[in-house]
Image (cartoon, helix red, strand yellow):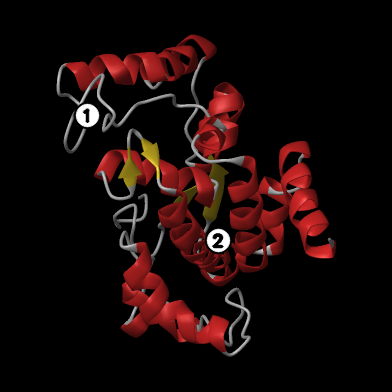
Amino acid sequence: MIGPIGKHSMPGAKGAANEVHIDIKAGYEAFLKHCVKHGIKIWSEACVLPEYLGPLPNNTRYVLILRDPRAVVVSWVHYSGKGLVKGKASEDYVTEKVPQCAAVTSVRYYWHDELLRRTHPSLILFYEDLVANPVDEYYRLASFLDVNLEPDVMFGVVDQTSAASMRKDEKHHLLPGPNRASSDKAKVRSATPDAFREEVSARAWANITAAMAPLLHPALRMKWLYNDLDVKFLGLKEHRRRH
């Protein structure tokens, strides 16, 4: 049995932890803002108490898929229309939302990687890896679920879940939720990990990335920030600070 929760919910969340859901701002302000304000690590038991994990079903496995918060916010801008200016994400909107999204993403990671794994199997996947190496990542998921797939079946799964296939489904209104094929609010636009970088200036990304970095769990910093593009952006930020 795969965890019977929505993709924006937290397993067993009780009390204030119920606020960690699709609404990034509400989740951040209700649950995490006080931790950040008082210098409490959001990926610690001082912020995320174990008792927030309510009774969980036995024999249940949980899967969490994470994506760079900068890409999440830019994608949300296009899908929702909030913060969209002349077809691009507003720098002010992205600057405000990315740190909040990073905080929520970090607590999700800690929740699944540390708290949940004390009692239940939990697999964490990354959107970027799913795009870059779908066969490897899908086999990781299949192994976690104890499912055996022959190569031809797996390639069929990869093909049916490709961006091209999902664009076709969206065109025929077959995806969940609003389908807006070939529009700026389409669910499937570029379907690439780094398209978000084209939305705002390099200088703005330096500020946004520097603001996000302290709110990312160390493992997520390793995943999303230790690369040439972000080193360049953060280097620009440091250069400005010194001069």
- How many neighbours does mark 1 have within 10 angstroms: few (below 14), some (14-19), or many (20 or more)? some
Image quadrant containing the C terminus: bottom right
Say if 65 sits above or below 157 in the image: below
- How many neighbours does mark 2 have within 10 angstroms: few (below 14), some (14-19), or many (20 or more)? many
Please tell me which residue is depicted at 60% across the width and 61% down the height of the picture: 212
Residue 43 occupies quadrant: bottom right
Q: Is residue 54 visible?
A: no
Please tell me which residue is depicted at 58% across the width and 40% down the height of the picture: 201
Q: Nearer the viewer, residue 170 or 37?
A: 37
Which numbered marker is on residue 175?
1
Instruction: Please give the residue where the numbered disc 2 appears in the rendered image.
Output: 109
Q: Could you tell me the amino acid type at mark 2?
A: Tyr
Left or right of 56 in this view: 141: right
Residue 24 occupies quadrant: bottom left
Q: Nearer the viewer, residue 5 or 233?
A: 233
Left or right of 105 in this view: 205: right
| Whether label 1 touches label 2, CB < 8 Å | no
Please tell me which residue is depicted at 45% across the width and 46% down the height of the picture: 72
Helix, strand or loop for disc 1: loop
Say if 9 sits above or below 179 in the image: below
Q: Nearer the viewer, residue 219 or 85?
A: 85
Q: Nearer the viewer, residue 197 or 35?
A: 197
Q: Could you tell me the amino acid type at mark 1?
A: Leu
How far across and how far down the image is residue 46, in percent? Answer: 58, 88
How far across and how far down the image is residue 188, in percent? Answer: 34, 27
Helix, strand or loop for disc 2: helix
Farthest residue, direction top: 152
Say if 233 sits above or below 212 in the image: above
Which numbered marker is on residue 153?
none
The number of callouts visible is 2
Q: Is residue 35 visible?
A: yes
